Amino acid sequence: MKWLLFLFVLLISSCGQNLGTDEGEEFKVVDLNPAFITFADINELILGPKCLNCHSWVSNEAEFDKRIIEGDPEKSPLYQQIESGRMPLGGPELTQSEKQLVYNFIANKVKKPEETLPDEQDENEEDIIIEVDLFERVKSEILIPRCLSCHAWANDDDSIKSLYVAGEPNTSKLFQVVESDTMPLFGPPLSDEEKGLIWEMISDQ
């Protein structure tokens, strides 16, 4: 009888030592107020320990911002990568609470309003508007969703324009890599329609 009582006490003691281990790991960051999450929080809890080994840019908020769409986590390439479990590469997937922390941080970032220039009359105003719209369409519909997860330049106008020669798509690096299906490196190649849109954008400038 004493032997059975000792075994029961030992079993209860062992269970008590392990109780809640997984839960503590899963919910260790869930108590942060979404409205007050800072980049320092994200960096300390997630980016530093989980991403810095492969991505040196993660400790730089400006570089982080290039890989997200402020206020829209679902369309942010960085969040898409971690939400799907593709990143961190070679390491354990982020916990649900860690993903939620990144989601809340991106959702609460407010895009700064762009300075509007006074209206200017120009005899070629209509052509200029068409050109800008086409560039923005390529950027928003192709480059950001298909390239930004690996290439920060996909969200920077000057960097994009440095990759092509205006009016010469065949000699432009941007068109060459998508036409040959060299890029995107991960994922299906661009469709003929997407390639045609890039060709048209470069040709019309």
Image (cartoon, grey):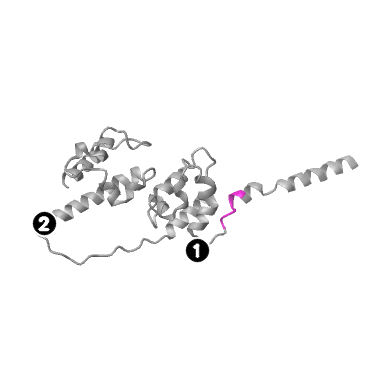
The image position of residue 7, as x and y in percent, is 83, 41
Q: Amino acid at mark 2?
A: Asn
Residue 36: mark in rendering: 1
The nearer-to-camera label among 1 and 2 is: 2
What residue would you read off at disc 2?
A: 124
First of labels 1, 2 by sequence position: 1
- Secondary structure, magenta segment, majority class: loop
Q: Is residue 38 left or right of residue 139?
A: right
Figure quadrant of residue 167: top left
Q: Amino acid at mark 1?
A: Phe
What residue sits 42% from the left and 48% below the top?
Answer: 78
Magenta-tinted stretch: 25-30
Note whether residue 63 is visible: yes
The image position of residue 30, as x and y in percent, is 56, 56
Task: State if disc 2 and disc 1 touch (CB < 8 Å).
Answer: no
Instruction: Check disc 2: other Cα within 10 Å, few if <14, some if 14-19, many if 20+.
Output: few
The image position of residue 62, as x and y in percent, is 40, 55
